[in-house]
Every structure is written in structure tokens, then in C-alpha cells.
Image (cartoon, rainbow, N blue to C red):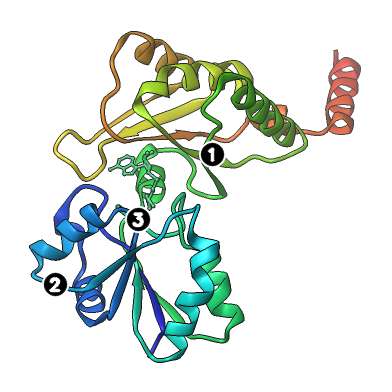
Amino acid sequence: RPALVLVATPIGNLGDLSSRALAALRDADVVLCEDSRVTGGLLARQSIAATMIPLHDHNEAAQAPRLIERMKSGERFVLVSDAGTPLVSDPGYRLVRAAIEAGLTISAVPGPNAAVMALSLSGLPPHPFLFLGFLPPRGGPRAAELARLRGVERAGLAATLIFYEAPHRLAETLAAMAEALGADRPAAVARELTKRFEEVRRGTLGDLAAHYAVAEARGEICIVIGPAAEEEAAGAEELDARLRAAMAAG
Ligand code: SAM
């Protein structure tokens, strides 16, 4: 029996709570969560009265040894996020490492994840993909991160890219992406997935940046960007060879 179970919860539609997720929550002695009001609401709707302990990025490392001791003494723990799959741009990684190092058995109940849902609806190549989570919120560090990413693409990375972003930053982030990665890159903005106003808008980064420069973006958002074109990703030697071949042919 696992000492720790990582349980995915809905990203907006309560119908996505699986029967295995419910069973794991019912079975738990302690539910580790981000915001006990959010998880408390979920548990109350299912008439589950579990003890909740908040786990955040800033207290996770300090809490982990105590939690591991309790797991060793036989208490059953479940880890959930406010929404979606734990550890994916959410707390839990340090606890998972600590549990593995302590030789404890861990398991997971898979389920909703915004990044994978956005990828599958984007119409962009699903493989290979690179999940990058949130970019830095401030303009300077964000531009530096995008420039670094462009450098990696120039060195040969040709993957679909997935990001999370807050609605109030969407317009400026799309503009920065268009500038750094190319306005003609195919992309998609996936909004409010699994919810009433679910929407996937597909177009080039330039189109999407222009759209959201004037349209207000509401709700929760993922950005998916198609891979850099092969020519762009080719190395300098390859480009030289192609140029020589083209000139010889001309
Ligand atoms: N662990 C979560 C998961 O598995 O998707 C992600 C947690 S992260 C803190 C929250 C971000 O995920 C949001 O800001 C948004 O970018 C994205 N997200 C979460 N729910 C979403 C939804 N229903 N539609 C689109 N994006 C969503």
C-alpha cells in the first residue's frame, strides 16, 4: 500500500474527478493541499472529512522530514493541487524526492492536466513537446528566457512548446514570443479548458498577439507554439552546405 498517492483533480469541470481519485481521497488519513479552502470545498462536496495540511513551495522543504516520519509510521497521505496534476507547476517535487529517498512506496492517480489537454487540442505536432510552465513575469527576464530558448532552437531543438500564462500578461507575452521566436510561428491559445467558455484560438504568434492586443483575455490560459521550422533549426554548417549547393545550382 503506497505511503503517498499523488492525486490529479479537475481543472475546472468537477465531472473530471475520477472514481480512483475519490477512492484515494476517502482512504487518506491526511490530504496535503495548496489552499485548504479550495481542497476543503472539493472534499465537502464529496462528504469526505479528511485532515488537510497545506503544502507550499515555501514550506515544503521544511515540512518534508516530519511528513516522511508520519508516512513511515503508517499514515496514508494524498497530495493534491488546487487544480490538475500535482508537481506540474505546483508543489510536491521535494516531497516526492524525500519519499523516494526514504524508500517509501509512492503512487499516482492520473487525471486532468491543462498542458497536455492544450497540446492535444492545439492542432500542433504533439511529439516531441517541451513543457516550460510559466515564463518570468517581468519583461526583462522574460525576454532573456525567450532569447535563450531561441538559441536552443537555433542549435537544433524542433519541439512544440507549452507555456502557462496569467490572463493579464497574455498580450505582452504573446508579443514578446512573436518578437523572439518569430511572428509566423503556428501557435494556439487554449482558454478555460473543460469549463463553460472553453476556447482554443489557433493562428500564427503574430495573429494571436494582434488579437489579444485588443481583445481582453479572461480565465485560465495555456500557450502552445509549434516547432521552429527545420531551416531555422539547422546548424551553421548545414546552412553553409545548403547555401553552397544553391549557389552551385544557380
Ligand atoms: N497542476 C496544474 C495542471 O496540471 O494543469 C497547473 C497548475 S498552474 C499553478 C495553473 C496554470 O495552469 C494556470 O495559470 C493556467 O495557465 C493553466 N491552467 C489551469 N487550468 C486551466 C484551464 N482550465 N484552462 C487553461 N489553462 C489552465
Whether residue 184 is visible to the viewer of this picture, yes or no, is: no
CB of mark 3 near ligand 1 (< 8 Å) = no
Q: Nearer the viewer, residue 133 or 139?
A: 139
Q: Nearer the viewer, residue 169 or 28?
A: 28
Q: Residue at x 85, y 32 (%)?
A: 238
Tell me the mark number nearer the camera, choosing from 3 and 1: 3
Question: Mark 3 touching mark 2, by CB under 8 A?
Answer: no
Residue behind mark 2: 48
The residue wearing badge 1 is 161
Amino acid at pointer 1: Leu
Q: Residue 132 appears in which quarter of the rendering? A: top right
- The residue nearer to you, when weighing 86 against 198, is 86
Q: Quadrant of the N terminus?
A: bottom left
Using residue 159 as the reference point, say whether residue 218 is left or right of it.
left
Q: Is residue 122 above or below residue 36?
A: above
Residue at mark 3 to residue at mark 2: CA–CA distance? 17 Å
Circle count: 3
Q: Quadrant of ligand 1?
A: top left
In percent of the image, x 89 and y 32: which residue is there? 237
* Cβ at disc 2 under 8 Å from ligand 1: no
As shown in the figure, which amino acid type bears the numbered disc 2?
A: Ile
- The mark nearer the N terminus, 3 or 2, is 3
To which residue does mark 3 refer?
34
Residue 74 sits in quarter: bottom left
Q: Is residue 42 above or below residue 50?
A: above
Looking at the image, residue 5 lies above or below residue 191 = below
Instruction: Please name the residue shown 50% across and 52% down the image.
Output: 58
